[in-house]
Image (spheres, helix red, strand yellow):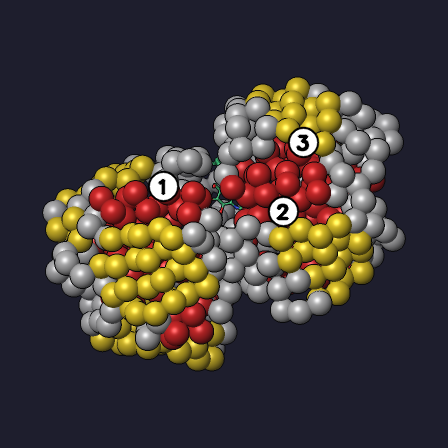
Amino acid sequence: MTKYIVQGGHPLFGEVRISGAKNAAVAIIPAALLVDGVCRIENIPQISDVTALLKILEQLGANVRFLNRSDVEIDCRHIATTQVSQELAHKIRASYYLIGALLGRFGEAEVSMPGGCNFGGVRPIDQHVKGFAAMGAEVREGDFICAKASGDRMKGANVYLDVVSVGATMNIMMAAALADGTTVIENAAKEPHIVDLANFLNSMGANIKGAGTDTIRIFGVDKLHGGTYAIIPDQIEAGTYMAAVAACGGQVLVRGIIPKHMDCITAKLQEMGVQVEEQDDTLLVRRSGKLRRTNVKTLPYPGFPTDMQPQITVALCLAEGTSMVTEGVWDNRYRYVGELTRMGAQIRVEGRSAVIEGVDHLTAASVQAYDLRAGAAMVIAALAAEGTSEVSNVHYIERGYEDIIGKLRNLGAQIDSVECDETIETRQIG
Ligand code: EPZ
């Protein structure tokens, strides 16, 4: 096991280049199963969730070849099985995308689902199942999800999502790309990675319209051909470095982003007194004075992202006055708060809200990552706190942040990764 040792209390200065979006990559890699040809996917982030998904594709019979560290060629012309090994699927939450992709291409799928809780609550997939069923599939749920189309192909259908779900929107889009007829998803999610998946599939010959709006129409085609596609930059990785500057102070140029995707985060940080200047594909983020209090409510895109909730909470811990953060997507995403209070933060959780009384400084402590974004928040808190902190369970962080140690050190952070013995907890997230 690895843990991070952080000597905090220093501002961050320099430049950071943002990697490809994790939540786009973990959908687009399974979507390659729909393609009867070779697809070259560029700007893939080097994170453990991606490694696990590529390994699953290889086990299914795909030919996977890295052309350099971020570009990969995937050839799914000779897939041998539609059963995904439990051992690998169990490691990542996004393995649910394999169901939509395998159903869409082969009319059947058997995928073991990640068990247990994640943010301390349930993460249901009923909306995914409802979509597959509307398209004629029979779905049996247990330790494994076994899904089978009624004929050779899925059938186009109208699906109204009861909740705005990123996963269900993408999964139904994949199942529908090669379906017989047209599928309409209403109340669809609008995150940048939804548009990215649609663009990937369209560049391989699919016919998908309306991604990025509430209503997505997928006109089924007979076949997808090979091609080349580059994944968008990671909105949340960029936001995490911006939140780190807010908490620690300093000046950082965040490179290789799509500024529009950052608006919801930029606006909140500006309210807090952080200066953010946009230029082409960069944001210059600066904080020298005291942070101001604000309220944040997480919502589906274009609202403030839930995947930035723990990171902005850390910054608000250091703002003057009382702030309130309300989680509007998940039932429970505050398990990390106990760790922050051990660093001197004053936070009271009431249902879906956290009331934060700003403090002057945080103090160093040994803390653990409860999940991916909570882990990133712990790193930010440790960077802002005076003294030496330890962050354990960092395998969660490495699921979603490419070379976080190298990127932070480049900004002058004193952070090291060391091997240790204990595992505090092992759960899925992502
Ligand atoms: C994706 O999860 C992301 N994961 C999450 O990011 C992110 O927090 C979430 O979207 C929301 O943006 C991946 O992309 C791999 P949802 P997903 O379906 O798709 C309820 C990270 O840190 N719901 O949009 O699983 C659900 O309980 C991770 O990178 C149902 O009720 O999220 C939640 O309240 C963590 N039934 C809400 O919808 C369903 O069938 C949104 O979930 C599906 C979801």
CB within 8 Å, label 2 to label 1: no
**Front tag of 2 and 1:** 1
For disc 2, does the CB lie below 8 Å from ligand 1?
A: yes
Q: Is residue 87 left or right of residue 83?
A: left
Q: Residues within 10 Å of mark 2 (few under 14, many from 20)?
A: many
- To which residue does mark 3 refer? 208
CB within 8 Å, label 1 to label 3: no
Work out whether 371 lies above or below 303.
below
- Amino acid at dot 3: Ile
- Amino acid at dot 2: Ala
For disc 1, does the CB lie below 8 Å from ligand 1?
A: no
- The residue most toward the front is 280
Which residue is painted at 64% across and 41% down in the image? 199
- Amino acid at dot 1: Cys
Which residue is painted at 51% across and 65% down in the image? 402
Which residue is painted at 77% across and 23% down in the image? 181
- To which residue does mark 2 refer? 27
Label 1 to label 3, Cα distance in Å?
26 Å
Q: Secondary structure at mark 2?
A: helix
Q: Return the disc, 1 or 3, that comes first in the chain's sequence.
A: 3
Q: Secondary structure at mark 1?
A: helix
- To which residue does mark 1 refer? 264
**Front tag of 3 and 2:** 3
